[in-house]
Image (spheres, rainbow, N blue to C red):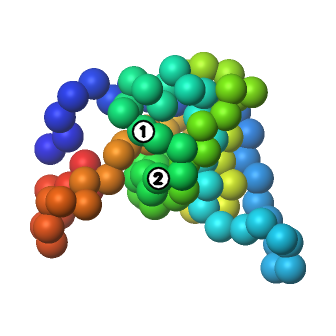
Amino acid sequence: MMEGFQPWLMVSRYLATHPGDPERGPLVRLHPSDARKRLLEDGELVWVYGPRRHEMAVLVVDDTVSPGTVVARDVLGIAPAEIVRVVKHDFDAGRSTRNLG
C-alpha cells in the first residue's frame, strides 16, 4: 500500500518516438514544484501509474511544464488528458510487490 500524499497529474502532452530517433525511451517531465512534492530529483527512475498499467521512466524536472501536468514520452498505457501518478521507486524494498504501489 502506498504511503504519503500522492497527487494526481494530467498528461498534457504525449510524445511517441520512432526507430532511428536520437532520443528514445520512457521519460516523464514534471514541473519543479510537483517534483519537490514527491521528493523526486532530475534524472532518477520513477513509476508512472496510468489507468491501464504502470511503467518505469526517467524523470526530467522542467520548469516549462505546467504545474499539475506531465509530459510523457514512450510511456505505455497512457494518453493525453488522462490522469496519472508519478511515484518514487523504493530500491531498498527488496524483492516484493509492496514497493509497486
Q: Are marks 1 and 2 in contact (CB under 8 Å)?
A: yes
> Against 58, is 42 above or below?
above
Report crowding for label 1: few under 14, some 14 to 19, many 20 or more residues within 10 A (C-alpha): many
Depth order, front residue of 68/40? 40
Residue type indicated by callout 2 = Glu
Circle 2 sits in a helix, a strand or a loop, which is it? loop
Q: Which residue is mark 1?
A: 40
Q: Dot 2: few (<14), some (14–19), or many (≥20) neighbours within 10 Å? A: few
Residue 56 placement (x, y as % from top left):
46, 60
Say which quarter of the image contains residue 26: bottom right
| Above or below, 39 relative to 51 | above
Report the quarter where the N terminus lies. Answer: top left
Q: What residue lies at 37% left-to-right and 43% top-to-bottom?
A: 87
Q: Amino acid at mark 1?
A: Leu
Residue hosting label 2: 44
Viewer can see residue 58: yes
Q: Position of residue 9 (x, y in %)?
A: 52, 30
- Judging depth in this view, the residue of 99 and 36 nearest the camera is 36
Q: Residue furthest front?
A: 42
- Residue 77 appears in the picture as rendered: no
Image point 25% across, 49% down: which residue?
Answer: 101
Lateral position of residue 64 relative to residue 55, left or right: right
